[in-house]
Amino acid sequence: VSRARVTLPPILRDLCRIDAPVVVEAATVADLVRGLDERVPGLKPRLCGPDGALRPYLTLVVDGVPVGRRPGDPLPPPRGAAEIEAWFLAAVAGG
Amino acid sequence: MRRPGPGERFLMLGTSKGAFLATCVDGGRWEIAGPLLAGWDVYHVIHDPRTDALLAGASHPLHGPLVARSTDFGETWDQDTTGLEHPDGGAVTHVWNLRAAGDGEPGRIWVGVAEAGLFRSDDGARSWQPVASLRAHPSRSAWNPGGGGMCLHTILTDPRDARRMYVAISAAGVFRTDDSGRTWHPKNRGVRADFLPDPEPEVGHCVHKLVLDAENPDVLYQQNHCGVYRSDDRGDTWIDIGAGLPSRFGFPMVAHPRRSGTLFTVPLEADVHRLPPGGRFAVWRTRDGGASWQECRRGLPERNAYLVVLRHGLAADDEGGVYVATHTGHLFGSEDEADSWRLIAQYLPPIRSVEAGRR
């Protein structure tokens, strides 16, 4: 289990009034999302579809590397740091 | 940002780039606030007078649909929409319509979505339960998407009997329940579906908007893809009331909230380009339940005005106010039941809906 410092896309930070990264304990994508949803009720459907996988065009990047999008996909361990840095990156498209 | 204060009249606009509020101040001047929920495609915003909360149905291409609730008039929003999922696996893509129940059902909110379905909240839009009986209706295989997707876009409740409701699904038609949603019955007899091999099927109708008469809840009206209709028997049968209009096609319709038989619509030329006939933008009004119609365009742009009003783009209030909001981001208002108009706002994002309220 890693201690993850999670940054959400700006539109969700605005919606949920989150100014700073959210810290959760997680070993998998599902753990991470569950931890976020406990801290910010209702966040899970914004990040995941009904099957628990990340929504299309949303990528989870940990310490600069994209990781899996399925619920059971593991998060990598910290690389010489106490925490991993996780970012949800939204695709940039549209008008 | 100016927000409506106690006692003030205001409008709620859903746009493709967020929500806006227009507050009537100083006896007729309107102040615009927004965008609220910036970046979200807001289809519908309502005011729940029971709680003084704003409720917004919105969606985002990456982050999905939501019902957001604000108790400070849009300063902050809560967005826990637990349960807003079809149990049969169908995708909920957009929130089309919100309806607060009456005083006898505190906390109850109805929401209509695409892919077509109905949900109920009993805790003021914090969590949702699907009304599975509607999607389980045996006619569902004959429901088809219209231009806006297959959506449940209008919900009406009978003010005399909370067990009776109507929903409008495009393209399926009108359905009524008399038992709080346990069973649903198609109510489309007399409505045409000219685009189908059988022009008068039980379902498959492209209803664009459904409204209830102000004084007699047995009377309904609908703007349909294939005409304008009135029912005098709770939807059991429909009669064509389109004679006198420049086109049978259009999207929006609203009933005067106090005056029986008075309603407004915006005809569009169909079916090729769906624009105001001749570029003359006008709201049309009947005061006799559709027996006759008047063109109301004093103050509206008269030439080269190719403005489109979507299905939730008309609103009316208790004081004679009528409001029309366009896909070009224009908002016009009338203080005299559509006799004359003036521009309230322009250059807004494409407006999907307008509702009128008073705190």
Image (cartoon, coloured by chain):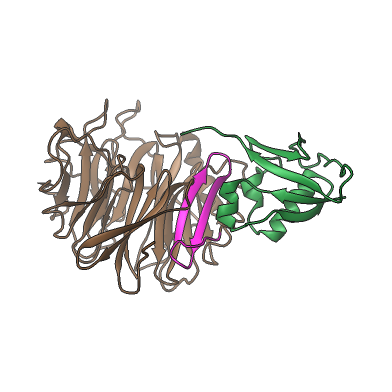
Q: Residue sitting at 41 percent across and 56 percent down? A: B45
The colour applied to the residues of chain A in this rendering is: green
Q: Residue sitting at 54 percent across and 47 percent down? A: B65
Residue B13, visible in the rendered structure: yes
Instruction: Pick whichever, B221 or B13, lies toward us.
Output: B13
Residue B134 in the image, given as x and y percentages of width and height: 50, 49
Q: Is residue B197 positioned above or below B25 on the image?
A: above
Kindly indicate the quadrant of the structure image that contains residue B262.
bottom left
Does residue B268 appear left or right of residue B176 in this picture?
left
Q: Is residue B43 positioned above or below B356 on the image?
A: above
**Residue B59: within the magenta?**
yes
Does residue A12 appear left or right of residue B317 in this picture?
right
Residue B74 in the image, given as x and y percentages of width and height: 45, 61
Which residue is the extreme one toward the front? A80
Q: Is residue B108 positioned above or below B209 on the image?
A: below
**Magenta-drawn segment:** B55-78
Instruction: Pick whichever, A91 or B257, lies toward us.
Output: A91
Q: Which chain is brown?
A: B
Does residue A92 appear left or right of residue B264 in this picture?
right
Residue B239, visible in the rendered structure: no
Residue A64 in the image, given as x and y percentages of width and height: 76, 37
Residue B213 in the image, given as x and y percentages of width and height: 25, 59
Kindly indicate the quadrant of the structure image that contains residue A71.
top right
**Residue A62: within the magenta?**
no
Instruction: Pick whichever, B3 or B147, lies toward us.
Output: B3
Q: Residue sitting at 12 percent across and 53 percent down? A: B340
Numbered marks: total: 0
Q: Is residue B158 positioned above or below B195 on the image?
A: below
Which residue is the extreme one toward the right? A80
Does residue B232 appear left or right of residue B1 in this picture?
left
